[in-house]
Amino acid sequence: MRAAGLLLARALLVAWALLHPAGTQQCHPAGPATVLRFTDRHAEIRVPALHRVPSPLDPLYGLVRRCLDLIQQNPLPTELLRAALNDPGSVRTSQVVQYELGYVVCAAVALLFTVAMPVAGMCFCYCRSRRRCGGRLRAHRRSLGCRRHCLLACLSFTSLVILISVTCAFVTSQRVKGQMEPGLGAVPTTLRTLRQHLANVPQGVQMVVDKFEVPRKQIISDLGGLSRSVGLSIHTQLKAMTYAALSDLQDRAADLQTSLHHLQILDGTSRALAAARAELEPALRERRGRVVALLDDPRCTSCASALGRAQSLELGADYGKVPSVEKVLKAMAGLPRSDFEEMIRQGNGTFNSIPELAVERMAQVIQDLREELSRTAQKVQSIADSFPLPDYTRPASKALVTAEERSRPYLREVERFEHYRWIAGTVLCSIILLILACNVMGMALGAYGLSKREDPSDYECRGEAGAKFLLVGVGLAFLFSWLLILLVFATFLVGGNIQTLVCRNWVNQEIYKFIDTPGNLPPSMNLTRQLNLRRDSNLSATYRDCKSGAGLWEVLQLDRSYDLDEHLKTPKYTADFQKRLGDFTAHLGDVRLLRSEGRQDLETFARSGLDEVDYGRFQEEMKNPLVQTSLPGLARNLEGLQKMQRNSTVAGRLGAEARALWQMQNSTVQSQEVLVAKLGESVQFLSRLAPHLKERVKRTLATTASVEARLPVQAQQILRQEIGCFTRKELRYFTQYLNWVGQTLREDVASCQPLATALDNGRVILCDRIADPWNAFWFSLGCCTFFLIPNIIFAIRLTKHFRPIRNRLISTGSEETCPFHIPRVTALKL
Ligand SMILES: *[C@@H]1O[C@H](CO)[C@@H](O)[C@H](O)[C@H]1NC(C)=O
Ligand SMILES: *[C@@H]1O[C@H](CO)[C@@H](O)[C@H](O)[C@H]1NC(C)=O
Ligand SMILES: *[C@@H]1O[C@H](CO)[C@@H](O)[C@H](O)[C@H]1NC(C)=O
Ligand SMILES: *[C@@H]1O[C@H](CO)[C@@H](O)[C@H](O)[C@H]1NC(C)=O
Ligand SMILES: *[C@@H]1O[C@H](CO)[C@@H](O)[C@H](O)[C@H]1NC(C)=O
């Protein structure tokens, strides 16, 4: 019957425990989960992105670009280019002229300039040699001063403009030179870097795969602490409950022991007291008779006062009348049959050994998990083995090698021509500076001469020298202006076409569209095939994809499409690991707190009838003194009376009685009183315990049973929870690693971003770093060249003003007398 009840209780407990999981699903190290660090990324081979650097010359570049937009307004000539690339023979000149109309007009202007300047120069020389121009003023006129100032101002202005332009030309020329070399060097370097990037993919993938070591080490180290932490967690969470049950049990065991002890005292003392009473009775009766007789004696002075007291010298409490506890003692005979202390120690020990037990029970599964991890490492290795790239990047690598080799001679040529350009530019700029120097010297000397006009000694030679300087400048300008315009036109033709044909269409990606349109490029230059790009893709799409971070395998043509995310799905690698952990069970909470003898002991104790004894009777009896009259009180009374006696015989007897009373008190009654006190303590203990006995024992038995039943269930639950937490934590490592693999493969190891970056870098180098200053160079130089025309005119006209006026007195000289007379030089008004 009881066993069935216990079973039922256990079943109910199990159901309760399952419905109310102990604690929520919180995993106890609640801090942030460990973040794995994957150092040592594969970043050494990368194409660094270049950017346009802002410069103070940007307004000039903008101006030049707008000029070029004005000169060349046609869009990308796809038809013309297609023809030129596929069949150069079929290109008709008229088409080219039509497209390059702006340049043709400029070429005409340049040609005109090239022809006209030397012709004008020769004319001027001729006319000078005939002394028909560049001579002297014929006479003073009032307006002369004003014109002179005006000419001076104009010449200064043109000189200033030329100075600014030549400075710009010089600066931009240096800038082109400074950018050209690294720019040209970047081409093979970038091609090589790209090739290396492709070649290093397998190594990089292997490196990424090898980094599985990081999560593996972390998981192995976590596994090392798992079993102990599970055990400790169970122990800590169930400790309070178990210790409380054990201490309850300990209390009951103590109750049993103590009750037994006190019952024995009760039995023993009440018996002893009853026996002592029987012994005391005749002695007391005799003593009473004597004392009463003595006090009754008429010779005993004022003894009547103590007579009442002596007469009540009778026995008081009778412990023969208290209830017997013999039955109870009999029922408890032989208790405790079991060693409670040892039993509790054992139970506690078993419970306290749960952590060690957990370590022992989980050893196998942890070993299995370690092996499972090695299998996972093999699976991860399959990422590298199945990574498709090495076979498919070969065409691209080959194309890159070819491009590198083919571009080398062109690059060398370009470098050579750039060198020539720089020399020519520097020389011509220096000549312009020389012209400017002549202008400045001429103007300075001339002006000085004019200021000293009233001082005839200096005046003439200074003015003459000034004029000569100006004429030297003019001569230089005539000599070199055609060379200047040739350099300007040549650089303009190249730079302008690069800007309008290439750069403009590169920025808006028209070039990629052109390359993508089938038939535009000759079949041998089919980039899709050469780089083995996806068949359904093209350069524009590839560039866009690469720029937005696609992996190489996403832009290359593979036999079968490869989905990296499919290969990086976490469950693929963790399912077995997870299953092994999920399937693991261990019984960890089997602790016997109370064995059956112990239980029987306690039950016997509860049924012993200890609580049925009438302890009130004992207490009532104890209220009575052992002797009705206090023996010491009477003895002192007698001693007091003794002193009052006149008859010495009576006094002596009184003294003897008092002594006898004292003796009785000291020898018998006192020891009985000690017994009574002892009895009182025991009665008090038992009477306090008795009303709660049954209930307490019952409760203890129930608690113990319940704890015994709950321990395994809750231990199991905690085990599951801990394993769940552990699994989630370890899965996060897998996820972290696989995410990192995906990210590293896509953005680093097998990224196709370098391709897009290389293209962008090409544009930045060609257009922003080279074409812009190049175009600014010819623009500035062209500016100088054209301003040489007004410069020449103003210089020639100014020379007349610097020369001394001949024959001041002859107002109208003939051609002979005034050989330097200049008729209005119309030839210079080009
Ligand atoms: C059980 O063991 C623990 C640890 O040794 C101790 O602290 C506790 O007092 C013991 N409990 C009982 C009831 O003996
Ligand atoms: C390149 O060749 C492929 C077939 O090999 C063809 O589908 C594609 O249109 C070609 N692309 C161009 C731009 O000619
Ligand atoms: C390039 O491919 C994209 C899609 O792949 C397509 O939309 C686009 O029209 C193609 N461009 C050319 C010029 O073929
Ligand atoms: C004292 O009392 C005793 C008897 O009790 C008696 O024999 C004796 O004579 C008395 N002594 C005197 C002096 O009265
Ligand atoms: C008995 O004890 C009391 C005090 O406890 C003492 O004064 C008295 O002398 C003792 N008497 C004897 C006969 O021992």
Image: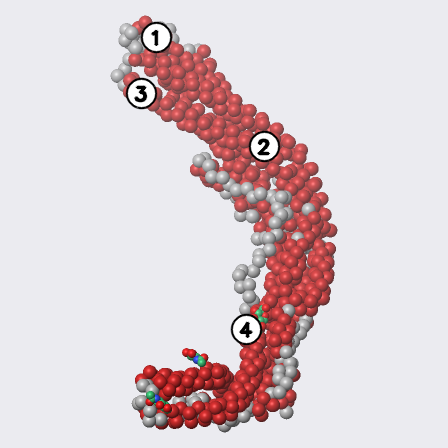
Which quadrant does ligand 5 occupy?
A: bottom left
Q: Residue at label 3?
A: 149
| Gap in angstroms between the C-alphas marked 1 and 4 | 124 Å
| Gap in angstroms between the C-alphas marked 4 and 2 | 81 Å
Dividing the picture into quarters, in which one does residue 34 lie? bottom right
Residue 716 shows up from this direction: no
Instruction: Say whether marks 1 and 4 touch (CB < 8 Å).
Output: no
Q: Which mark is residue 229?
A: none
Foreground pick, 793 / 579 = 579
Query: Amino acid type of disc 1?
Result: Glu
Q: Residue at label 4?
A: 240
Between disc 4 and disc 3, whose residue precedes?
A: 3
Q: Residue at label 1?
A: 460
Residue 609 shows up from this direction: yes
What crowding class fits label 2: few (fewer than 14 Cα within 10 Å), some (14-19), or many (20 or more)? some
Q: Residue at label 2?
A: 181
Between disc 1 and disc 4, whose residue precedes?
A: 4
What crowding class fits label 4: few (fewer than 14 Cα within 10 Å), some (14-19), or many (20 or more)? few
- Specify how the rendered protein is coloured: secondary structure
Between disc 1 and disc 3, whose residue precedes?
A: 3
Q: Secondary structure at mark 3?
A: helix
Q: Secondary structure at mark 1?
A: helix
From what the image shows, is residue 683 above or below residue 770?
Answer: below
Query: Amino acid type of disc 2?
Result: Glu
Query: Amino acid type of disc 3?
Result: His
Query: Amino acid type of disc 4?
Result: Ala
